[in-house]
Image (cartoon, coloured by chain):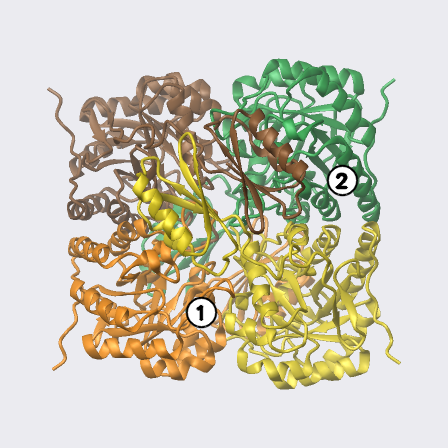
Chain colours: A green, B brown, C orange, D yellow
Amino acid sequence: MIVVMNPGASEEQLQHVVKMVEEMGLTSHIIRGTNRTVVAAVGDKRMVDKGAIENAPGVEKIVPILAPFKVASREVKPEPTIVEIGPAKTPIGGTSPIGVIAGPCSIEDRSQLLDLAEQIKASGAIALRGGAFKPRTSPYSFQGLAEEGLEYLAEARERTGLAVVTEVLTVTHVEMVAQYADVLQIGARNMQNFFLLRAVGEQPKPVLLKRGMSAGMDEFLLAAEYIISAGNKNVILCERGIRTFEEYVRNTLALTIIPAIKRVSHLPIIADPTHGTGHQWLVEPMSMAAVAAGADGLIIEVHPDPEHAMTDAAQQINPQAFTQLMQRTTRIAQAVDRSMAFLKTIS
Amino acid sequence: MIVVMNPGASEEQLQHVVKMVEEMGLTSHIIRGTNRTVVAAVGDKRMVDKGAIENAPGVEKIVPILAPFKVASREVKPEPTIVEIGPAKTPIGGTSPIGVIAGPCSIEDRSQLLDLAEQIKASGAIALRGGAFKPRTSPYSFQGLAEEGLEYLAEARERTGLAVVTEVLTVTHVEMVAQYADVLQIGARNMQNFFLLRAVGEQPKPVLLKRGMSAGMDEFLLAAEYIISAGNKNVILCERGIRTFEEYVRNTLALTIIPAIKRVSHLPIIADPTHGTGHQWLVEPMSMAAVAAGADGLIIEVHPDPEHAMTDAAQQINPQAFTQLMQRTTRIAQAVDRSMAFLKTIS
Amino acid sequence: MIVVMNPGASEEQLQHVVKMVEEMGLTSHIIRGTNRTVVAAVGDKRMVDKGAIENAPGVEKIVPILAPFKVASREVKPEPTIVEIGPAKTPIGGTSPIGVIAGPCSIEDRSQLLDLAEQIKASGAIALRGGAFKPRTSPYSFQGLAEEGLEYLAEARERTGLAVVTEVLTVTHVEMVAQYADVLQIGARNMQNFFLLRAVGEQPKPVLLKRGMSAGMDEFLLAAEYIISAGNKNVILCERGIRTFEEYVRNTLALTIIPAIKRVSHLPIIADPTHGTGHQWLVEPMSMAAVAAGADGLIIEVHPDPEHAMTDAAQQINPQAFTQLMQRTTRIAQAVDRSMAFLKTIS
Amino acid sequence: MIVVMNPGASEEQLQHVVKMVEEMGLTSHIIRGTNRTVVAAVGDKRMVDKGAIENAPGVEKIVPILAPFKVASREVKPEPTIVEIGPAKTPIGGTSPIGVIAGPCSIEDRSQLLDLAEQIKASGAIALRGGAFKPRTSPYSFQGLAEEGLEYLAEARERTGLAVVTEVLTVTHVEMVAQYADVLQIGARNMQNFFLLRAVGEQPKPVLLKRGMSAGMDEFLLAAEYIISAGNKNVILCERGIRTFEEYVRNTLALTIIPAIKRVSHLPIIADPTHGTGHQWLVEPMSMAAVAAGADGLIIEVHPDPEHAMTDAAQQINPQAFTQLMQRTTRIAQAVDRSMAFLKTIS
């Protein structure tokens, strides 16, 4: 941390800052510049709130030097984390093939889900997604089939071997959802629901952590840090669009975070071009762009009949469009020297 | 809802849209314009996902007409909601005096809290805030005193008569927190934690609902709608800053939402200039601006010794600064023909 | 500037950075921390692009310490700048009374403008605004009366004594506009039109510089720095709303920049609640909030018949609404120990 | 346009709105819904400011139906525009090969530029970029070599056959820059400098129009509309990143605008991953992603010695990195069934 003093700060104010720095267990170095005196505070005290110093007399601002995350960083663990998901233990991360998770926004009907699972498997998906509990902006919207939906997902896994990915919305559901799912998804709206992060960190199933709509990269990795520091190393990050002024999309898919995360963190990161754009006609090109940018996988909403979907109808694609998306994305994967993951048969 | 057809949409596509609209229980009116044909869909079906129509062939886009919230709107309830808080039943909302809630970011020490409660009461606050459970971005930061902190708050209320406002972070805590607190606060990070919204909606204590960092006005009111539709009408909204590109503040305090909310909703709205700016030297001017813009109250972080605060040290003010803030804000309140709330003595 | 080295940076890489720093004419100090080595570069070289160092091997990032602006800063000039405008030399800035500039978005008609000028003067405005050249987002929109409009403004000044404020859009117009106007306005879209900034800096009339829609505080002050360093010290800043995700306003009026600018700069700053909100019903409360936050003045669009305005009709208020706004704002001004400016009669 | 009336609007207010709509030359249709009465106004009057209606009594809001741009739209011109640039008339747009423009941020030295031109040509670029006049945020930064720089660019074209792309900053430079350049670039900061847009529209050289930092898609296309409606159809759009809260990049590269523009407009669109990210290590992956998303070309800053670049040093890549970028991007181009443009030899 660097403490920048005001131009007119007194020697006494400077010494007070030095004292505060040292009370925090840090070592201080005073550098007297042409226009400013700064105090460099040395030591790794990520757990101390250093904002206090900003309140001390004569202080202009403080500038952090160390990234706030630790166990999610490449510094602590240089080699990439590879997360294995589902009965086939399909690896995600590092140089593993690109894994695609597909399925409806919400689970609406048993036979429809089972049919769809077969279709997406045939097109090359390695996991089935589907919402049993839905976080709906409006209390009047369809809220999901709850545990019944989880049973259908499990049944689809039995039949196809696909891994099951589903969202968990609240601490009290973690145990139940973990009984059915192979991967617990934390939605964008819960990225800073710290009790929930800890709860999924204390169970062993892999976690798919979506970036919050207005989360910076540091905050995103700190959310992962909560899960890891609670004991669960199997975290897959997911970029799903951020909130900006752009009017032609529901969210702005910020693909640059993919290579940026890979530079500082060992965690795998996938992209969600469905929520990341909000329109079905944008899902295919942005899937291709995400893989070109280095994504380790994709999560795509596919519905057998999007016109009659009960939720997020505007952004779901149908199985035919998904098949084409997979074909085109496979070519991009090859162009970046990666293949597409396929589902190993379990004997 | 207005469905806008593509310029080259066929008559068949148009009739398909009409059919979809009518299947939703809505009446359709076709308007053939110079460049576009549109279908106006009439009827109040806020609970139907109309996105499906965007996926139908020949459709360019859909444009909603009705606001998505209902029970939070002035249409349904024109007169302002007045929420009474604490043992003194201090009213917030309508033309009630402006109520100020003050206290430390987190509760750190019993005697310190009791002293502070006396001080803020003397300066004119009507409620004491304090975090017992802290939603911290980093897992390494101080996480709060938990139930012990709630006990100190309750003790402070006993001694001073101040109402107690504290945050509830997870569904499983609602019952416990409601035993101690007069007002349950839902933090910005939980504004779309729909299970938590429902849980505080199902208990009787008033709720202080903070706006999410990237929540639009409609989303903010829909979050309130969750609480109200679960049975609890006593919702106080709170603007606490939004996430933008601005680099000199932690958040951008968007005060315009105050008169904008008052136009469409009957709910009271207060401002949080502490989190809304992130710097102690900005709290006073933005408190004054908030009251000038029509805020029904303020929530301010006050700490006896901000330099040694364990959390959010940079943005907390000390009791002396709070006293001055109250004096200056009182003058603004008078200039908008409102007074400052004071704590009635309970006999 | 602080150069942060990568965790594994070699001694050779460190020495290479030290050499680069010294080639820039800066002094270097190496600080070896627990997790990072940093190089503090001391000296005031705001004109050198230090980004090059970020490209050197072993460098993680660079962190600037000095604000990039200089002549606009309080460091260089601690006392506030007071800008005198118009024939009455009404002062703006420091502890001067609050000056209100009012008038139509665009000048449409001579007699209408002259009548309006009398009305706004009667309500307490000290300057008349009006667009002669209009920066319109669409090429099909009304583009203004050009020089004819400027003549009407000058005639209105003759009759009323009001100062004339009007926008200059391009370098080739500066001389002509300066012949008629008392204050040259640089619009938000031109805040980084550096040739135009220099051109208005090379003539003597005061400049009203609006903040760009996505300009940070540093960029805003650097734009002022262009004008001042070209020779013109009479710069008045203006907050007019920034672009965010907010959907209920045209822009988000970021009033916090008012006290923030006053902390670091000596320049006066006013607010534009008309463009800052985009809706006429928000102009009055946000005018009041701006003055409470410390604004040195306001600029308000007033039109005799907003329903028939040729531009920006939704956001202009009528003269009756302006009179009420002035009365209410006067009370806020008094509550912050300031008065409203009035137009001195020139004998 | 749809005019939405307030719930309690009177019949008289409704008729007043109908009258206003008809005065604008539009036809009105009244639709009486369950909760709202709306007036649909039919006709193509993109040039009329309809905001006035928002000010009429009883009106809640107005909702536009037609996109505000016209000659830039696919409706008016369904087939893609192909722009031919430079002596080799390299086509950009439609299904043409992907054209890459490369060169230094600013022109610093003649022989360095000539060498670099040969190098980027050898790697497959079809045009040379270089700034002769630099729009610098700070007045203390290097401002470019001016006309001397343009001469060097022209000399490089003579030697290599590369097209020359350079920025024009102000109306008075258009004629001079057009003498040297093959493509006139309008920078992000000038996207709404309407006089400049018109000036480049009145000359025949193709225009590269960069998206403003906070421009929506409609505003971007309206800026193109200014150029086209002034007589110049040869407009190439360029996504170069938008301003958001993201802290790890200088701008957020919003690649989704590429397929979105292609849906509504016939204009070619390229990407600028240099300014779009601000860090040299992000340029390659985001170039690949842009081509995968459908970009018609790229513009990349390449400097022979980025460590000693006088401007934008942190984001320029060296010629070796550019060669690798071209190789990797070629593979992505092939994966989307496009090739990379190459420079035809002019005999």
Residue at (24%, 26%) from the top-left corner?
Answer: B85
Q: Dot 1, how many residues are within 10 Å of its Cα: few (below 14), some (14-19), or many (20+)? A: some
Q: Position of residue D222 (x, y in %)?
A: 55, 61
Task: Name the mark nearer the viewer: 2 or 1.
Answer: 1
Comparing C38 with D230, the one in front is D230
Q: Can you say whether D24 is above or below D308 in the image?
A: above
Q: Which mark is residue C143?
A: 1
Q: In this rendering, does residue B199 appear at all?
A: yes
Q: Is residue D162 above or below residue B89?
A: below
Chain letter of mark 1 equals: C
In the displayed structure, C166 sits above or below B315; it is below
Please name whichever residue, C91 or A303, is drawn nearer the observer in this view of the structure: A303
**What SS does tag 1 mark?**
loop
Say whether residue A209 is visible.
no
Figure disc tally: 2
Give the camera-side residue of C97 and B125: C97
C-alpha distance separating marks 2 and 1: 57 Å
Chain under disc 2: A
**Residue A95 appears left or right of D13:** right
Look at mark 2 in the image and give the residue it sits on: A94
Q: Is residue B50 left or right of residue B165?
A: right
